[in-house]
Structures are given as C-alpha cells and as structure tokens.
C-alpha cells in the first residue's frame, strides 16, 4: 500500500502497511541519532515492538552499521511492582531479551524503575530525579492501550505529574496474564512516569496497529482531552508522530 500522511489536532499521522511499521520507526530513530548521537531514548515494552518488527529492525540496522547506539542512553518509563529485574517477566528482562543483548554499540547503562524496591515512594523519587538529571527524554517510543493508557498511565480522575505507583486496570492485567503462569501472578501495580515526563519528552513516536485499535485511536486523538483517556493528553504535546496501519486508521479520517 502507498503510505499516507496527515495532521489531526496538531499531531502528525502516518499510515503505512503493518509490514512497514518497523522500518518507518527505524527511519525516525535514525534521524534522531543523526541529529543528536547522545540522545536519551525512551523505550516501550508490550507486543508492538516485537509484533511489528521494531526492535528487530533496529538490531538489523545496527549490525549493518546504519544505527549506532554507542553514545545514546536508554530509559524505560515503567516496571511491574513486586518483581525484580531478574524475573523473566520483568520489563528489564524483556528489554534484555529482545533488544539490549543484541546490540553491539550499546555502551551506557540502561535505566528502568526498580519494581522490587523496598520503599516504592523512595524509588519513585529516585527515578524522577534521574529523569531530571538526564533532562528528560529526547525521543520516546510509545504504544497505545485499548483503554487509552500510555506507559502505565491508566485512566483516572487525575494523573500525577511525577513518577508514581499506578494501579493497573483490570483489562490490562488480563492482556498481560498470558505472560505469567497464572492470572493471580500478574502484578496489580506498576511504577510509571507521570505527565511531566511525557510532556517534556522532546519527540514522541506512538505506534498503534490493528483494527482493534481503531476506536481508541479515534477517541484519543479526535475526541476530548481527558485524563480518562490518557493518550488524549498527547494532543497538547508539540511534537508527536503517530504511526498507524490501515486497520487502526479506519476512524481517524485521514484520506
């Protein structure tokens, strides 16, 4: 299919074939690293980076000398509460398995909240201070949950500005339950960044694909701005690119 581009509420949209999502995200990342090799790169977990070949494309391009992460810093915005980084279902383990261990040019330590910290409030403060020391994120990759969550910022009447402990929506617990031996093992909370870190990211690339995402894409980006749909707050961000496929773009109205 021929890719299409448009703008909705000040946000840039690109509609590409699902098979081209990985390549397009890699193009945007390559441009970021050309402009600023020492970029702070915000990561995401979930199904999208693997299903659409995003991390695989980064690994391939790095092996061929097209991407160089030697001066970049990686940071993840969230982690399960109650499991340590060595747990096979931790987000740290996910990143190691699917990206970090494959990179030859990665030199700097990566950063992720410690979900097994003895004092979670202290850990939130530590991670928030780290974000400030890094001067927040230069380029943030995001997915979009079916309930409109971004990172693990879940729908709520209000959303904290700084890193906090979030209760995970039951729907998202169910979507993650396949990663654990029993649904009861799925953590009920996460440590996640707050709205200040989202809004201070200098560039955000959000990926949403599949017909099951069409309704929430339209709700989040054509509907009202509300904390009940956290992704809708991205309408207030000055530099967001949303990558969709034909299925997820069905209701956004870009022709």
Image (cartoon, rainbow, N blue to C red):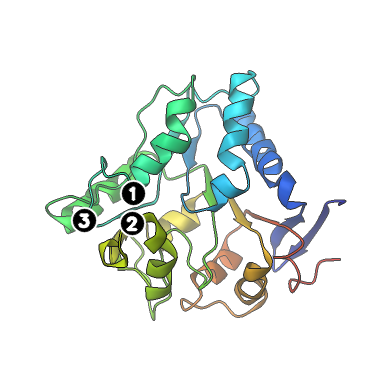
Any mark on residue 180, and which? 2
Q: Is 141 left, or right, of 17 in this rendering? A: left
Q: Alpha-carbon distance for marks 1 and 2?
A: 7 Å
Which type of secondary structure does the marked residue at label 2 adopt?
loop
Number of numbered tags placed on the structure image: 3
Q: Report the disc number at residue 89.
A: 1
The residue where tag 3 is placed is 82
Pointers 1 and 2 in contact (C-beta within 8 Å): yes
The quarter of the displayed image where residue 175 is located: bottom left
Q: From the viewer's perspective, is residue 188 above or below residue 65?
A: below
Q: Does residue 155 appear left or right of residue 206 in this picture?
A: left
Q: Is residue 248 left or right of residue 232?
A: right
Q: Nearer the viewer, mark 3 or mark 2?
A: 2
Q: Earlier in the sequence, mark 3 or mark 2?
A: 3
Quadrant, the C terminus: bottom right
Q: Is residue 196 visible?
A: yes
Q: Residue at x 77, y 56 (%)?
A: 15
């Amino acid at each position: 299919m021929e890719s299409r581009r448009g703008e909705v509420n000040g946000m840039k949209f690109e509609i590409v074939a699902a098979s081209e999502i990985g390549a397009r995200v890699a193009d945007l990342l390559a441009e970021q690293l050309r402009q600023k090799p020492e970029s702070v790169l915000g990561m995401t977990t979930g199904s999208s980076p693997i299903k659409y070949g995003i991390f695989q494309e980064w690994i391939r391009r790095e092996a061929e000398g097209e991407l160089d992460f030697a001066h970049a810093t990686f940071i993840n915005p969230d982690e399960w509460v109650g499991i340590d980084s060595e747990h096979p279902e931790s987000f740290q383990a996910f990143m190691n398995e699917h990206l970090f261990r494959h990179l030859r040019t990665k030199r700097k330590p990566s950063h992720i909240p410690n979900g097994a910290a003895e004092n979670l409030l202290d850990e939130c403060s530590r991670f928030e201070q780290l974000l400030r020391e890094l001067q927040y994120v230069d380029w943030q990759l995001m997915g979009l949950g079916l309930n409109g969550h971004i990172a693990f910022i879940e729908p709520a009447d209000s959303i904290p500005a700084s890193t906090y402990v979030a209760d995970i929506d039951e729907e998202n617990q169910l979507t993650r339950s396949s990663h654990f031996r029993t649904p009861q093992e799925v953590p009920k909370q996460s440590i996640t960044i707050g709205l200040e870190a989202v809004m201070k990211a200098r560039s955000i690339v959000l990926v949403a694909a599949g017909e099951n995402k069409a309704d929430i894409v339209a709700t989040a980006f054509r509907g009202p701005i509300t904390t009940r749909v956290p992704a809708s707050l991205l309408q207030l961000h000055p530099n967001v690119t949303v990558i969709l496929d034909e299925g997820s773009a069905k209701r956004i109205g870009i022709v």
